[in-house]
Image (tube, helix red, strand yellow):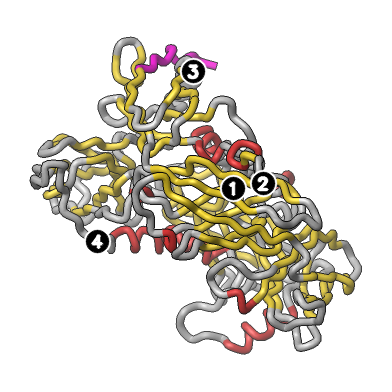
């Protein structure tokens, strides 16, 4: 659901702030001197001190280690803050306050900001955050008779900037719009989207009911689940196609009033049957129908088959969808059966969808370690279709290093192994003679008997360096590390980082191999980004190399 997906971002921050404390110890088993970071938080307009702003330091490479801590402090009445006892390292540094846009360290406008690098015992005391007033989009959603519509999910979407597009360049399909805020209309049909950066937004409304936490309207939930909706999702000012929608501009501190109307459209029923792996109808499955191609703001529909394996999904508007069934009793190991089918919905009911579980290919495998010890049960295998980026299968690795991925459809898939701790990388992954890290995992119907052999190593490489322009450090530049040659399947090894306050960057835990390194500045004040020459580097096991990148001067378009 739209709102629940957006809410995950807030939940993630709560989990970060609850992270466990660790004591930094160097290789000589001596406690490293801790750091202190202090400064002020003020308003961008008048420069007035801002009280009770939360200032947060989040470790940059927390996904590579299970031992990390988030540090935070609140600003006082003079806007001053002090964060003590901070471990050395690189941090995403930001300030946040209700009614203002979250501000990254040394960020100006829409820039992504700069990483803060701290050396052992360092004190940084000249930090200043200038907070920009957030924008608000509010309005009313009504039906064609002018009656208010309650429980409508409203989401603000924006086009990703160039840095965000490049971060996802490993994906064959990149999102044209991204959700940044969401809410639900009340009994007056009114909604309010707040905390927005100044800019342009597209507003999308969906009749997808999500009950509030208190005073749950149980009957309404049952009605929506059983009958579906009579309203297709719409964009402001009331059109069904994003290409016909109008962007809503808002400035700092502005509140835009955007009302629009949802109109009834003919919806249909999608029904069919789920067949189990034994060839008999089964009720042991979930059935989901999602918009195709998928996006972060897709509308989903669900149903459970009855004892005859039959399911019905009501209130489906015209469009392209992917119907997927997954075995209910597969648990959390990812080894259950699943099936999927793409359908086109027009104005007639569809009653012939057949989802046969267990008709795909089962691939087994084993993870081995080239030196060192790995907790295999923390690892998981993921296969993603290169055609439409839909899941091809996944499985958790067992304690003995073995895994089974069941019911893989025909196609070619990107292979990825998640859950690795800092310094570890996938040295090789093969299915027979095929190198699936570079060439992908090819699955043909009726194929069987092959296994995947995965080898892990801790002999990773490190690469650090600096980016300069006109003899000065270029801070906040985006540095990209790309496999050379690059294929559609090794892009999972692409890495990106942002230069810190000294114009420096670091990559660790890199799989040995050939790479290209390139840096690009942020697009500021209408100037084209400054781009460095591409630097080629060959990294061996345990390598630690340093590169110096020089960006050409920015040019006006």
Disc 2 + disc 4, Cβ < 8 Å? no
Q: Is residue 6 above or below residue 29?
A: below
Counting residues from the start of the chain, the first of labels 1 and 4 encountered is 4
Q: Position of residue 390 (x, y in %)?
A: 67, 54
Counting residues from the start of the chain, the first of labels 2 and 1 encountered is 1
Q: CA distance from mark 3 to mark 1?
A: 27 Å
Q: Residue at x 26, y 48 (%)?
A: 57
Residue that label 3 marks: 534
Count how many numbered circles sit on residues in the image: 4
Say which mark, if any, is on residue 24: none
Counting residues from the start of the chain, the first of labels 2 and 4 encountered is 4
Q: Position of residue 462 (x, y in %)?
A: 35, 31
Q: Residues within 10 Å of mark 1 (few under 14, many from 20)?
A: many
Magenta-colored segment: predominant secondary structure: loop
Instruction: Report the span colored magenta.
Output: 548-557
Q: Residue at x 42, y 26 (%)?
A: 539
Direction from residue 73 to residue 266 in the image, left or right: right
Q: Position of residue 337 (x, y in %)?
A: 68, 69
Disc 3 + disc 2, Cβ < 8 Å? no
Q: Residue at x 38, y 39 (%)?
A: 509
Q: Quadrant of residue 344?
A: bottom right
């Amino acid at each position: 659901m739209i709102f629940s997906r957006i809410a995950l971002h807030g939940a993630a921050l709560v989990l970060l702030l609850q992270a466990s404390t660790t004591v930094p110890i160097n290789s000589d088993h001596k406690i490293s001197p801790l750091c202190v970071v202090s400064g002020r938080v003020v308003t961008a307009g008048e420069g007035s001190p801002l009280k009770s702003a939360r200032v947060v330091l989040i470790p940059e490479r927390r996904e590579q280690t299970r031992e990390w801590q988030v540090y935070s402090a609140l600003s006082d009445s003079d806007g001053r803050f002090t964060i003590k006892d901070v471990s050395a390292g690189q941090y995403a540094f930001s300030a946040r306050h209700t009614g203002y846009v979250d501000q990254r360290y040394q960020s100006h406008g829409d820039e992504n900001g700069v990483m803060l690098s701290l050396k052992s015992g360092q004190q940084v005391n000249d930090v200043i955050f200038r907070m920009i007033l957030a924008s608000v989009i509010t309005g009313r959603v009504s039906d064609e008779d002018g009656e208010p519509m309650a429980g409508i999910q409203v989401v603000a979407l924006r086009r990703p900037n160039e840095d965000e597009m490049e971060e996802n360049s490993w994906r064959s399909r990149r999102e044209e719009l991204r959700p940044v805020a969401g809410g639900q209309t009340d009994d007056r049909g009114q909604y309010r989207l707040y905390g927005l950066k100044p800019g342009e937004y597209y507003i999308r409304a969906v009749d997808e009911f999500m009950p509030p936490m208190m005073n749950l309207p149980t009957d309404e939930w049952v009605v929506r689940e059983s009958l579906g909706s009579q309203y297709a999702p719409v964009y402001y000012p009331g059109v069904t196609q994003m290409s016909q929608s109008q962007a809503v501009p808002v400035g700092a501190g502005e509140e835009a009033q955007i009302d629009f109307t949802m109109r009834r459209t003919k919806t249909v029923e999608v029904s069919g049957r789920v067949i189990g792996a034994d060839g008999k109808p089964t009720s042991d499955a979930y059935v989901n129908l999602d918009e195709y191609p998928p996006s972060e703001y897709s509308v989903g529909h669900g149903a459970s088959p009855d004892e005859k394996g039959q399911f019905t999904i009501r209130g489906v508007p015209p469009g392209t969808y992917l119907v997927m069934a997954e075995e209910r009793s597969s648990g959390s190991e990812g080894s259950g059966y699943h099936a999927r089918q793409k359908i086109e919905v027009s104005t007639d009911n569809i009653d012939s969808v057949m989802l046969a579980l267990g008709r795909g290919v089962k691939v087994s495998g084993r993870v081995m370690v080239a030196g060192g010890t790995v907790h295999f049960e923390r690892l998981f295998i993921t296969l993603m279709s290169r055609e439409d980026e839909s899941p091809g299968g996944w499985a958790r690795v067992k304690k003995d290093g073995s895994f089974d991925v069941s019911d893989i459809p025909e196609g070619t898939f990107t292979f990825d192994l998640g859950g690795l701790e800092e310094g570890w990388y996938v040295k090789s992954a093969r299915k027979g003679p095929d190198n699936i890290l570079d060439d992908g995992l090819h699955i043909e119907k009726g194929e069987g008997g092959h296994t995947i052999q995965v080898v892990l190593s801790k002999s990773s490489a490190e690469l650090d360096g600096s980016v300069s322009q006109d003899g000065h450090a270029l801070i906040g530049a985006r540095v990209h590390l790309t496999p050379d040659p690059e294929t559609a399947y090794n892009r999972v090894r692409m890495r990106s980082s942002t230069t810190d306050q000294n114009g420096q960057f670091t990559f660790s835990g890199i799989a040995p191999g050939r790479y290209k390194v390139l840096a690009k500045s942020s697009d500021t004040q209408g100037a084209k980004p400054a781009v460095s020459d591409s630097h080629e580097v060959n990294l061996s096991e345990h390598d630690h190399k340093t590169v110096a990148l020089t960006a050409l001067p920015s040019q006006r378009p």
